Image (cartoon, rainbow, N blue to C red):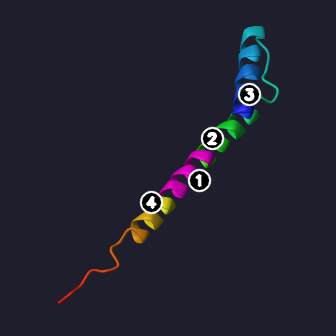
Amino acid sequence: MLLLAVGIADLLRSALLGVVPESGITLSMLGLASLVYYYLRLRETRRKRASELEASESPADERTD
């Protein structure tokens, strides 16, 4: 989030001053990519935990006749 904030701040500063952005675009893209990666890993971890929980909650004493 820090990279995204610094990148957006540089882009805004550049827009206000009317100059070419220095590294704001790169920092913004890195920050955005980091947030997407974090979200995807979080979702993967939650799915894995849910499937492990379902496997552990399956009744062990079910009888099939």
Residue that carries the numbered disc 3 in the rendered image = 7
Residue that carries the numbered disc 4 in the rendered image = 50
Type of amino acid under label 3: Gly
| Image mark for residue 35 | 2
**Helix, strand or loop status at disc 1:** helix
Disc 4 packing (10 Å; few <14; some 14–19; many ≥20): few
User: Measured from the top left, where is residue 54 in percent x and y?
Assistant: 39, 65
Dot placed on the residue nearer the N-terminal end, 4 or 1: 1
Type of amino acid under label 4: Ala
Mark 1 or 3, closer to the camera: 1
- 50 vs 13, left or right, is left
Dot placed on the residue nearer the N-terminal end, 1 or 3: 3
Looking at the picture, tell me which residue is in the foreground, 16 or 45.
45
- Which picture quadrant has residue 36? top right
Type of amino acid under label 1: Arg
- Tell me where the magenta segment starts and ends, as one range: 38-47
Mark 4 or 1, closer to the camera: 4
Looking at the picture, does residue 6 appear above or below residue 29?
Answer: above
Looking at the picture, tell me which residue is in the foreground, 19 or 33.
33
Type of amino acid under label 2: Leu
Dot placed on the residue nearer the N-terminal end, 2 or 3: 3
* Label 2 close to label 3 by CB (< 8 Å): no
Q: Residue 18 colored magenta?
A: no
Mark 4 or 2, closer to the camera: 4
Q: CA distance from mark 4 to mark 1?
A: 14 Å
Q: Quadrant of the C terminus?
A: bottom left
Looking at the picture, does residue 28 appear above or below residue 9?
Answer: below
Residue that carries the numbered disc 1 in the rendered image = 41
